Image (cartoon, rainbow, N blue to C red):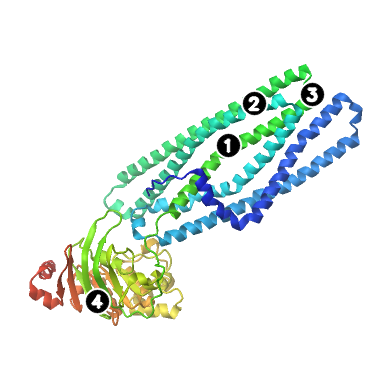
Amino acid sequence: MKDKRKYKSSALIKRFLPYYKKYIPTLILDLFCASLTTICEIVLPLIMREITNAGINDLATITISYVVRVGVLYLVLRIIDSAAFYYMSYTGHVMGVKMETDMRRDAYAHLQKLSNTYFNNTKVGQIMGRITNDLFDVTEFSHHCPEEFFIAGIKGIVSFIILMNINVWLTLMIFLIIPIMFLVCRKLNKRMRETFRKQRQLIGELNARIEDSLLGQKVVKAFANEDIEQQKFEKDNKNYFSIKKQSYKFMGAFSTSTRMFDGIMYASVVIAGSIFMIKGYINAGDLVAYLLYVTTFIATVRRIIEFAEQFQRGLTGIERFVEIIDADIEIFDEPDAVPLQNPKGDIEFKNVTFEYPDDHNQVFENLNFKIKNGEKVAFVGPSGGGKTTLCNLIPRFYDVCDGEILLDGQNVKKYTLKSLRKSIGMVQQDVYLFSGTVYENIIYGRPDATREEVIEAAKKAGADEFITTLKDGYDTYVGERGVKLSGGQKQRISIARVFLKNPPIIILDEATSALDNESEFAVAKSLNELSVGRTTITIAHRLSTIRNADRIMVLDCDGIVEEGSHNELLELKGIYYKFNQMASELE
């Protein structure tokens, strides 16, 4: 999937923030717990400062009861800290998972609305990567991002105030180093984000390559091309290795720079602090407290900077999610669309012009024809003439570029997509069966049907006879894409699915062309029964399957060039006559 749009970090965060809305109470409590853990860290240096100063100035003031009270106080704070940390670790992460789940739901819902054009130009592996792996990092981002910045804010402000009270000049010296650190890290961050983006794209390509190879494994083996597929895989695998290696290079440079700045700050405190203590500008207890606070502060700065890696991963996941959400919905319900009620099945193409949106390849121009209610019409013609495209325009898998398609006298755009498509049953050459049982695949045609209705539909489709001979009957697992069944069996299950749907309009797109003679005969018989009393559009290369059609139209790049019954078209001795002659020779 190629998307040239670039998103700024601020824009991505703005798009992400609404997902917190449902979980604001959880987030507030999470941040409250974060503040409790921060207080526990801040209190320890103060305790050590008091004890150190008391020990140096007047050791007698440090009594056992004083030490016990301080110890108990700190222990209580640690218990509070542990409870707060558990809440953050458990409930905070669960909040992140819920937000990830919400985003995945929205992405999937949006994908359902996208047109065929989108899926024709997008690899399934890429899509799967975007709604699964890419959103994993969002869980950590959604939980840790507000937490880390909130804690850093508290520690930074409190540490700055306390350190300024201890020694102004030493504090200013330390805080002057921080902007330089952030500038260096920001530059490396940009490199990291671009690398993570490329990494996500390449893992999507790798997934797509694996999926393509595994789904086509029979073809691979048939041509003994395992070595070629291995070479393709190795190429993608090495590309992914290279980009991941590059990401670790930037991560290493990032971590090294933060450690170097840590060392500079610690060295500054030790050297300058010792000099100040010698000069009498700071006492020993204050220097100990100062070192502890600087350690806490540096650890916080380091954590924020190191969190930048997770931050960038999260932003990359959000960006790839947003790219799905921003994909244009080309086929949608018009504002004035109404449900299609009791359709009759009268279809008319009125000056229809169509070209594919992605490659602008014009299929036909000013196409006109009518199909009456209950009429059986067949389309024949050379490959690439637009027969399948024509059928895809009726249920609005694509929208016409010009002209209109009328159903019962109304433009199909005046009907809601759901009601329009519920009124149309399609049986295609390339049957798709879902991974599941025979029963589950048939009931897909009407999910609220009873088992008796499913069996009746199978009987009408001529499928019940072979289904009952299967190991588990209707509960037999068909395998991925129905690999455990023959072509004829899969086709009859798809016909049973349409029987169960019981639509007034039937579209048969090369429904028998890939079958052997025996299977074709059984399927053709089922199709004839299915088409009784319905408006039926048939596309076929085998002319024997359409001889009984009420009307046959010959479609090529110039539109409808011949029209009539089988016998009428033979008498014309035109294109259809030639097709028939070639078919007879082949038989």
Along the horizontal axis of the image, is 6 left or right of 185? left
Q: Earlier in the sequence, mark 3 or mark 1?
A: 3
> Splitting the image into 4 quarters, where does residue 66 fall?
top right
Task: Give the secondary structure at mark 2.
Answer: helix
For badge 3, the amino acid type reads Ala
- Left of 58 or right of it: where is 475? left
- Whole-Å distance between the Cαs marked 2 and 1? 17 Å
Q: Is residue 189 above or below residue 437?
A: above
Disc 4 to disc 1, how far (Cα)?
67 Å
Q: At x 43% / y 44%, what residue is drawn?
A: 6
Q: Which is more N-terminal, label 4 or label 2?
A: 2
Label 1, residues with CA under 10 Å away: few <14, some 14-19, many ≥20: some
Read off the residue under disc 3. 284
Q: Secondary structure at mark 1?
A: helix
Q: Which mark is residue 573?
A: none
Task: Judge depth for marks 2 and 1 and give the one in front.
Answer: 2
Residue under label 1, please give it: 306
- As helix, strand or loop, the secondary structure at mark 3 comes to helix
Real-space Cα separation, disc 2 to disc 3, in angstroms:
19 Å
Q: Position of residue 33 (x, y in %)?
A: 70, 48
Find residue 233 and report its image quarter: top left
Q: Is residue 334 above or below residue 98?
A: below
Residue type, mark 1 in image? Glu
Residue at disc 4, secondary structure: strand
Return the disc, 4 or 1, that comes first in the chain's sequence: 1
The residue carrying mark 4 is 371
Q: Which residue is mark 2?
A: 265
Q: CA distance from mark 2 to mark 4?
A: 83 Å
Question: The residue under label 2 is which amino acid type?
Answer: Met
Give how far apart the Cα atoms at labels 3 and 4 are: 97 Å
Q: Earlier in the sequence, mark 3 or mark 4?
A: 3
- Mark 2, residues whose alpha carbon is within 10 Å: few (<14), some, or many (≥20)? many
